[in-house]
Amino acid sequence: MSIVRCNMLKFTSIKLTRHYSKFECKEGQVNSAKKPPILYGDEVSPPVRFVMMTAAHLNIQLDFHPIDLFKSEHKMDAFNQINPLQKVPVLKVDKDVICDSHAIAMYLCETTKSEDLYPGSALARAKINQMLFYNATTLFPIDSFILSEYFCGKMPSGVKVDEWFNSLHYLNTALSVSPWLAGDQMRICDFCCASTISSMETVVNGIKKFVYLKRWMDELEKLPCFEINRRGLERLKYFMSLYKPN
């Protein structure tokens, strides 16, 4: 995720600092002998929160390096050497780098013995991937556009709001058939879409219009790992309060 900002804080060049964050959860197993992967990100970003919630739920330790998007740290030379795309999240595993949240979450699931969030069945994975790709191609692009406009002093247009509601209607229809986006059990696609939708709720309050979607979000908010999402949303709301369009 990158943020387009107008009239924002003056750019400050600061050295990337190391901050260790251990996520606690009951499920999954991790090899404590291995060096934890490094996650670069800002909790204000839905894709970053998606990855962090996945790691937390699977009890995977990550070495979290904060990249402050509102100080343009994602555009600094030090980070550009890690990810020339200048976006977060980025997961560094030894010398290898993964630069997409969906790919990172899938990788994390593959490193555990648990199939809770991403089972081995080809059909089950196809259903999960379908919703991950829906987030990548539909939900997140709308979210990114509207929030970028907001930070440039513009409220969302009626056309974009309608587009957003249409995208939520699709999910609500899916959730009228099953309690989770990919079937009867919670999967990584639920974390993925929820992080994007909850961010958009700060600008366009749409969940209350959809019964099944609201029920689904309420269930997710009961999870311990969802505290990560709440924390990121508070950070987002803070910056939104500073740059609220007139």
Image: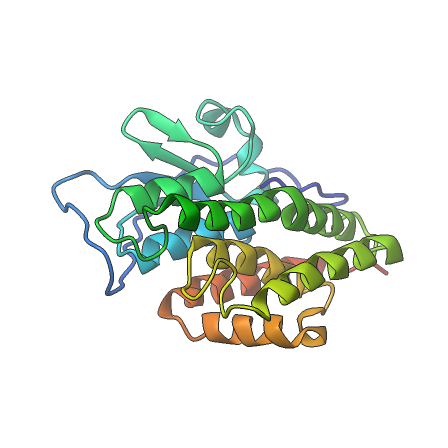
- Identity of the residue furthest to the left in this view: 33
Depicted 187 relative to depicted 90: above or below: below
Image quarter in which the N terminus is found: top right
Give the side of residue 231 with respect to residue 224, left or right: right
Which residue appears at 30% of the width and 42% of the height?
110
* Residue 51, percent from left and from top: 42, 49
Image quarter in which the C terminus is found: bottom right
* Residue 6, percent from left and from top: 76, 43
Frontmost residue, 173 versus 70? 173
Depicted 232 relative to depicted 102: above or below: below
- Identity of the residue furthest to the front in this view: 123
* Residue 163, percent from left and from top: 79, 54
Give the side of residue 47 with respect to residue 15, left or right: right
Depicted 36 relative to depicted 225: above or below: above
Which residue appears at 29% of the width and 53% of the height?
115
Give the side of residue 94 with respect to residue 2, left or right: left
How many discs appear? 0
Which residue appears at 42% of the width and 63% of the height?
186
Residue 227 in view:
yes
* Residue 125, percent from left and from top: 42, 46
